Amino acid sequence: MAGRLRTAGRILLGTVAAVAVGLYAGGDYIRLHAPGWLGGSTAPNRPVAWQQGPAQAPAAARPPNVILILADDLGYNDLSLTGTGPGGVATPNIDAIGREGVNFANGYAGNATCAPSRAALMSGRYATRFGYEFTPTDTRVPKWFPTSLFRPDAMFARNIAEYPSQWEHKAIFDEAAAARAPSPGAKGMPASEITVAEQMKARGYHTVHLGKWHLGEAKGMRPEDQGFDESLGFIIGGQMFLPENAPDVVNSKQDFDPIDRFLWANLPYSVQYNGSPRFAPNRYMTDYLTDNAVEAIKANRNRPFFMYLAYNAPHTPLQALKSDYDALSHIKDHRLRVYAAMVKALDRGVGRVMAELKAQGLDDNTLVIFTSDNGGAHYIGLPEVNRPYRGWKATFYEGGTHVPFLMRWPGRIAPGTRFAPMISHFDIFATASAVAGAPMPADRRVDGVDLLPFVRGEATGVPHSALFWRSGAYRVVRDGNWKLQSLERPRQDLLFDLASDPTERRNVAAANPAVVQALLAKLAAHDADQQKPAWEGLVHSPIAIDRPLGTRPVKGEAYIYWTN
């Protein structure tokens, strides 16, 4: 048995991370277990020469610009508009997007982890329609990785009730699936998917991507192959914000999290421009991406453009600028202070982007969208990132999928609008397409809808009567105010009435058997309309719902098993 566990450890690249800790995947995999090996070699910084648009503005009215700003693992409580901000730190620039436009009170992520959520956002479809169900992972792991995290593989298919107590909170690893796994670079959004960037480009827009991609690195999957004229960022799921020993960085390492050790040892500090060899940024990553977003706005001031600004903040590794950290001396907890400083930098970046739009006279002619790819993560050890909601990233509780979702377009969206019906990430595809005048693809089902007529009171009804999420056997539907979570380990159905219980505290399944059966039927019908996963889930990992990683287990506590 011990031998099998050691074998599992050797062939698994932190798949637990993708499940319970949000591991990054992709990259060259050239250097094993040396600093930065996920990204290969990195050249010194070089300036980026953004492609310049016309020198003069067109005489006639031009189509509106669209800027989509995506944060990474930002919790619902991390904005002062939707919560308190981390450690009480305000986010005035991000808040202003919602205050001067619309705050979607029930905005949902396409999934509860990075990559499938981004696939839904880019395609306008449930990512399960094209098999993008799990975050891509490799199957190699550093020798130090603690295989004691895994249950014996012989127990893989058995119900949790049959396990001895010593295995109750350990991940189930499917060694056979790992042996069959394709290379990580081939795991991504298929080239056959039509992206929002391709929609915009077809209407004459110049399309720009900055930051995180995480949707595949094989030919046809990269941003340059998926409709973006220019891409500056990283294909894998994350990067360092600064070198670990930079004089102006403050780090927070989570010693209770083995994957944090992996990230610190192996993540590079690098970017690529349109597939170039990797080179180093010249400053803190959040500020570097902001600098280049500002320059790209200047370059495109006289032509319509679509910008996808995908910050990697505040995802781990937790690294802050010393100046931001020092400005938050009222926060005594070091980890929370670093995290709050990261959010502070994110808010500063958004403010600079908005200020540049005004400076270039583009403010009134630009739709700006802000959201997060999923909820805040439990593995950072901070208990309040998703308050008031239960759960975390990698769970389909509201804490994992209920995200900040804001839009601003002066003159087109009334300031202070609050929109209560539920919407999803995949609505961004249809909304941006409508702004550009791009028709919906006729050869496939598009799940998203144009939100602007609903926001402006021009459309009746609601954008969606039901939304669905799936990761392996863990399936969830929200239908109106009913929300059903169907779990496999242990087999149970949890029913919540979000109208009276928005934080999912009271399971009312026993009192509403007809509702449970009706929602199970809807889940089955939805599943029948999706594709099988394009690659298998390798690990089923337990995540406690009511406490973050790094805290002591509580006997009888609620948890779910997340498949990836």
Image (cartoon, rainbow, N blue to C red):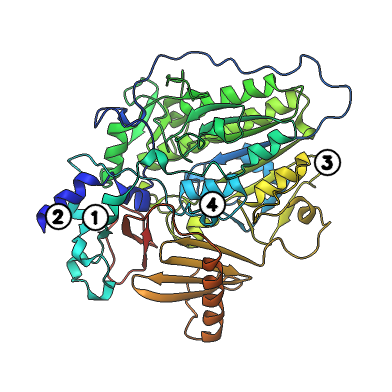
Q: CA distance from mark 1 to mark 4?
A: 36 Å
Q: Earlier in the sequence, mark 3 or mark 4?
A: 4
Name the residue that disc number 2 marks.
4
Q: CA distance from mark 3 to mark 4?
A: 27 Å
32 or 193, which lies in front? 193
Q: Quadrant of residue 39?
A: top left
User: SS at mark 3?
Assistant: loop
- Tell me residue 128's x, y (percent): 51, 56
In this picture, residue 483 sits left or right of residue 57? left
Element type at marker 1?
helix
Labels 4, 2: front one: 2
Q: Amino acid at mark 4?
A: Tyr
Look at 22% across and 54% down and name the residue there.
149
Residue 411 tag number: 3
Residue at 53%, 68% (x, y): give it: 528
- What residue lies at 35% left-to-right and 49% top-to-bottom? 21
Q: Which residue is mark 1?
A: 175
Number of labels in the image equals 4
| Among numbered discs 1 and 2, the one appearing first in the sequence | 2
